[in-house]
C-alpha cells in the first residue's frame, strides 16, 4: 500500500473524541450541546465536538484555580516539573501520526507538513521551555547597604489561551510552553474550526504526569466560550492569537472584567522588498513563493505584499509565477501535496471575494485566481499572483489569509520603505539586497517585529515572535515569552 492510500485508510478509521478536557478527564458540555465538524479536504464528517459555553469555562477556570492555589504544579521542584514537560514532549512525538492526521483532517494542512513541521515544532517548543524552566533567575537590586531588594518572577495564576485554526498545535504550544514552565494553570480555548488536537494534547500532558486541573481545554465558539474566558473574573491573563478584530474585543473584555493582562498576536500584511542589486533572483522568488503558499497562505506572517524595484519587476514576476504554478492544490492526505485545502467554506468565500476585488480594482492576475478541485467536496484555491497592485487596493491593505500574493513596484529605496510601512500591521518583513549598507538601513527603517534579510523562512524557538502596531503586543517564543505569564515581585528587606 502506498503512503497516500495508507493515510487515507488511517483517516477512515479515525474516530476523534470531541469532548472537553477538565480536571484531568474528558467531559461533555454542561448542557450537552455539541457542534459538528466536517473536514475541509472533502467534507467528510469528523464527529461532534462539545460546544463549551460560560458554564464550561467556569468549571475549567475553577479547576485551574484550585490547582494553582494548592500548588500541585507550581509547588513542585523545578527539576520535577522539567521532567514532566520533557515526558509531555516525548509523548507528542510518540503520537506524531495520530496528531498529524487529526490536524490535516481538521484544517486541511498537507499531511507531510503536519507530520514533519507541526508535530515536531510542538514537541520541540514544549521541550525547550522545559529546559528553560530553571534558567530564569531573579535579581538583586543595587540598593544602599541598609537594604536588600530581591526581584523575583512569580507565576500569574490562571492563564486563558485562545488560539487560531491555522496552526492549532504550534500556537497552543507557544502559549502552553512558557505558561506551564512558569508554574501557571491554563485553560485553552481552541478554534471551533480546528479543535481536535487540543484535547488530545491535554490527554498526553496528563499521561506525562501533569496534575489534574493544570491544563484544561474547552472547545466552542468564540462568541460563547472565548468571550466567557476573556470576561471571567478569575482569569489573570489572556494569551490570544487571531484576528485584529477579535484582538480589540479581547482588550475590551479585559476592561469590562478584572483588567486581566491581554497579550495579542494578531494579523499581518508582511512586505518583501526586492532590490535590483540582489544577485540571485531565482532563489528570492523560490523563497518568497514557498513562504507565501505554505499552509495555503493561511499564515499571519505570509509575505503577501511583494515590493519589487521597477527595473527587475518583469523578470521577477515571471519567476514568481513559475514557482506559484508548482504549488498545485492537491489531496492533503497525499504525502506529495504541498498546497492543501482552506479551513472551511467561509474562508473559501472570503478568499474568492478578495480575488474578485483585486480584478475589480484593476490588478492583473498573472496566475491562478480560481477555485480548484471543486469535485472533491473540499475548499481549494489556486495559488494566485496579482501584478500592478497599488497600496491603496483592498488586496494590498487587508489580510486575506489565503494563497494570494500582490506585487507592487517601486523606484527608490525611500519609496520602498514608505510603501512597506504604509500598513496598519507590523508583523514581519524581508529585505533582499547584497548591498550591506542598504540591508542595514532598510531593516532599521522597517516597522516590523521581525525583519529577514535575504531569506524569509528561517526561524527558531530562541527568537521572539510578534509585531508592531496592530499586529499585537508582547512576544511569543524565546525567553521573552515568560514576561507574559509571570509577575515581578520585589521583596524589600531592611538590614540593621
Image (cartoon, helix red, strand yellow):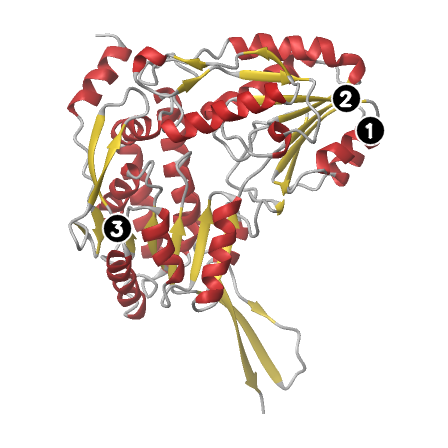
Q: Residue at x 57, y 18 (%)?
A: 289
Q: Residue at x 54, y 21 (%)?
A: 356
Q: Label 3, on which residue?
A: 52
User: Which numbered mark, 3 or 2, is in the foreground of this view?
Assistant: 3
Q: Label 2, on which residue?
A: 275
10 Å crowding of disc 3: few (<14), some (14-19), many (20+): many
Q: Determine the CA span between mark 1 and mark 2.
A: 8 Å
Q: Residue furthest front?
A: 360
Residue 185 in view in this figure: yes
Q: Is residue 61 left or right of residue 11?
A: right
Question: Marks 3 and 1: CB-CB under 8 Å?
Answer: no
Q: Is residue 150 left or right of residue 256?
A: right
Image location (x, y in percent) of residue 194:
33, 36
Circle 2 SS class: loop
Rendered image quadrant of residue 492: bottom right
Image location (x, y in percent) of residue 92:
30, 37
10 Å crowding of disc 2: few (<14), some (14-19), many (20+): many
Q: Label 1, on which residue?
A: 413
Question: Marks 1 and 2: CB-CB under 8 Å?
Answer: yes
Rendered image quadrant of residue 37: top left
The answer to whether residue 330 is above or below residue 466 is above
Q: Residue at x 29, y 37 (%)?
A: 197
Q: Determine the CA span between mark 3 and mark 1.
A: 51 Å
Image location (x, y in percent) of residue 320:
62, 13
Amino acid at each position: 500500500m502506498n503512503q497516500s492510500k495508507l493515510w487515507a485508510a488511517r483517516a477512515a478509521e479515525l474516530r476523534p473524541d470531541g469532548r472537553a478536557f477538565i480536571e484531568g478527564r474528558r467531559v461533555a458540555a454542561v448542557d450537552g450541546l455539541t457542534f459538528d465538524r466536517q473536514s475541509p479536504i472533502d467534507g467528510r464528517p469528523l464527529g461532534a465536538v462539545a460546544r463549551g459555553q460560560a458554564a464550561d469555562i467556569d468549571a475549567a477556570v475553577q479547576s485551574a484555580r484550585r490547582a494553582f492555589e494548592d500548588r500541585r504544579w507550581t509547588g513542585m521542584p523545578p527539576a520535577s516539573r522539567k521532567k514532566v514537560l520533557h515526558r509531555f514532549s516525548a509523548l507528542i512525538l510518540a503520537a506524531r501520526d495520530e496528531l498529524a492526521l487529526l490536524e490535516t483532517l481538521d484544517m486541511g494542512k498537507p499531511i507531510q507538513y503536519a507530520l514533519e513541521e507541526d508535530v515536531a515544532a510542538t514537541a520541540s517548543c514544549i521541550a525547550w521551555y522545559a529546559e528553560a524552566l530553571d534558567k530564569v533567575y531573579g535579581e538583586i537590586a543595587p540598593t544602599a547597604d541598609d537594604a536588600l531588594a530581591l526581584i523575583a518572577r512569580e507565576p500569574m495564576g490562571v492563564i486563558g489561551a485562545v488560539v487560531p485554526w491555522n496552526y492549532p498545535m504550534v500556537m497552543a504550544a507557544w502559549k502552553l510552553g512558557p505558561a506551564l514552565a512558569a508554574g501557571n494553570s491554563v485553560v485553552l480555548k481552541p478554534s471551533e474550526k480546528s479543535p481536535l488536537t487540543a484535547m488530545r494534547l491535554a490527554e498526553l500532558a496528563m499521561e506525562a504526569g501533569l496534575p489534574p486541573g493544570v491544563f484544561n481545554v474547552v472547545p466552542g465558539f468564540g462568541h460563547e466560550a472565548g468571550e466567557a474566558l476573556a470576561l471571567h473574573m478569575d482569569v489573570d491573563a489572556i494569551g490570544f492569537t487571531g484576528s485584529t478584530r477579535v484582538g480589540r474585543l479581547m482588550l475590551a473584555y479585559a476592561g469590562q472584567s478584572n483588567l486581566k493582562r491581554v497579550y495579542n498576536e494578531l494579523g499581518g500584511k508582511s512586505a518583501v522588498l526586492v532590490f535590483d542589486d540582489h544577485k540571485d533572483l531565482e532563489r528570492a522568488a523560490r523563497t518568497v513563493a514557498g513562504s507565501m503558499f505554505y499552509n495555503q497562505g493561511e499564515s499571519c506572517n505570509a509575505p503577501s505584499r511583494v515590493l519589487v524595484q521597477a527595473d527587475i519587476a518583469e523578470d521577477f514576476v515571471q519567476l514568481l509565477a513559475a514557482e506559484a504554478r508548482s504549488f498545485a492544490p492537491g489531496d492533503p492526505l497525499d504525502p506529495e501535496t504541498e498546497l492543501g485545502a482552506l479551513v472551511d467554506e467561509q474562508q473559501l468565500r472570503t478568499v474568492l471575494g478578495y480575488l474578485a476585488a483585486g480584478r475589480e480594482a484593476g490588478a492583473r492576475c498573472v496566475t491562478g485566481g480560481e477555485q480548484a478541485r471543486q469535485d472533491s467536496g473540499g475548499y481549494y484555491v489556486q495559488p494566485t499572483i496579482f501584478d500592478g497592485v497599488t497600496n491603496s487596493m483592498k488586496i494590498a491593505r487587508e489580510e486575506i489569509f489565503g494563497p494570494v500574493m500582490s506585487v507592487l513596484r517601486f523606484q527608490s529605496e525611500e519609496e520602498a520603505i514608505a510603501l512597506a510601512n504604509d500598513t496598519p500591521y507590523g508583523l514581519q518583513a524581508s529585505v533582499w539586497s547584497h548591498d550591506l549598507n542598504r540591508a542595514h538601513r532598510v531593516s532599521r527603517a522597517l516597522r516590523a517585529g521581525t525583519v529577514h534579510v535575504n531569506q524569509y523562512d528561517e526561524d527558531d524557538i530562541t527568537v521572539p515572535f510578534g509585531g508592531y502596531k496592530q499586529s499585537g503586543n508582547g512576544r511569543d517564543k524565546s525567553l521573552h515569552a515568560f514576561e507574559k505569564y509571570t509577575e515581578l515581585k520585589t521583596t524589600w528587606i531592611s538590614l540593621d
